[in-house]
Amino acid sequence: MASRDMDMRPRHPFPGAVGMIKITEIFHSIQGESTHAGRPCLFIRLTGCPLRCTWCDTAYAFYGGRDMTLDEIVAEARASGCPLVEVTGGEPLSQPDSLTLLTRLCDEGFEVLLETSGALDTAAVDRRVHVILDIKCPGSGMADRMYWPNLERLSSQDEAKFVIKDRADYEWAREVVRREKLLSRCAVLFSPVFGEGEVRQLAEWMLADKLPVRFQLQMHKYIWSPDMRGV
């Protein structure tokens, strides 16, 4: 595990044009993950990501996309009529103007979720935003890219998510939860890698250890085809 004291000051590797944000897709769907699972949600998926997780299911967001102004994005969110908005990726914080977008959405009165990999510094994220921090387990191949000070900023409105590939990931995640006292900070979610192994196994490990974290599945992949975009 990378040392939590190692200051790997994150860089923003996907700057884009000034005043513009590269967008892969904007769509209205059912929130499939987090404590908000089951709620209608508008997703704003930004392009670009500095990580390459072994189980990534949105590699199509690494490249391409279209340039949109902040005004255009906010107008589309307003037109959706949906009060819950999630800014996701890729890695949304890889575009610095995403910070302004998050604040603009909050100013508009939306309930705003940010799904972020944990590899980039969240210090500048508007505190009205509900941060869903994806803590990368060893099975992702990206555990050494975690920016550990992000965990210290988690509060009761935020969430820490672990995607679990195998028993080694589970034990690693369990140790991080205990060491960082995450259960006293925020909601904690354990999610099995979709399509790998039996989902019941993770649930049984949690029960055997009496670990009071939330078990979650990617609900949208059971409603629609797992490979379908825009859901």
Image: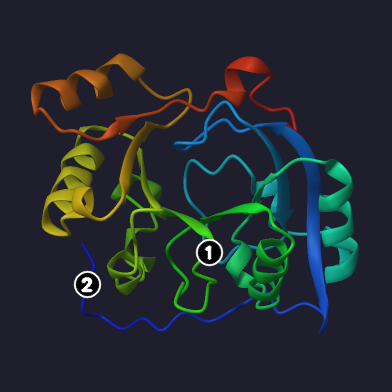
Percent x, y of residue 67: 88, 67
Residue located 45% across and 25% down the image: 217
How is the rendered protein coloured?
rainbow
Q: From the viewer's perspective, is residue 126 above or below residue 175?
A: below
Question: Relative to residue 16, is residue 129 drawn left or right?
Answer: left
Instruction: Determine crowd level at label 2: few under 14, some 14-19, many 20+ residues with C-alpha closer than 10 A.
Output: few
Q: Nearer the viewer, residue 127 or 214?
A: 127
Disc 2 residue type (three-letter): Arg
**Mark closer to the observer (1, 2):** 1
Question: Which one is earlier in the sequence, the residue at label 1 or at label 2?
Answer: 2
Q: Considering the numbered disc 2 on the image, is that residue within a helix, a strand or a loop? A: loop
Percent x, y of residue 141: 38, 53
Residue that label 2 marks: 4
- Figure quadrant of residue 106: bottom right
Q: Is residue 179 visible?
A: yes
Percent x, y of residue 118: 42, 63
Question: Relative to residue 201, is residue 78 drawn left or right?
Answer: right
Residue located 31% across and 32% down the image: 214
Toward the left, the furthest residue is: 209
Q: How many discs mark residues in the rendered view?
A: 2
- Figure quadrant of residue 109: bottom right
Q: Considering the numbered disc 1 on the image, is that residue within a helix, a strand or a loop? A: loop
Residue located 25% across and 80% down the image: 6
Percent x, y of residue 155: 34, 60
Q: Which mark is residue 128?
A: 1
Residue located 57% across and 26% down the image: 38
Image quadrant in which the N terminus is located: bottom left
Q: Is residue 69 visible?
A: no
Image quadrant in which the C terminus is located: top right
Disc 1 residue type (three-letter): Arg
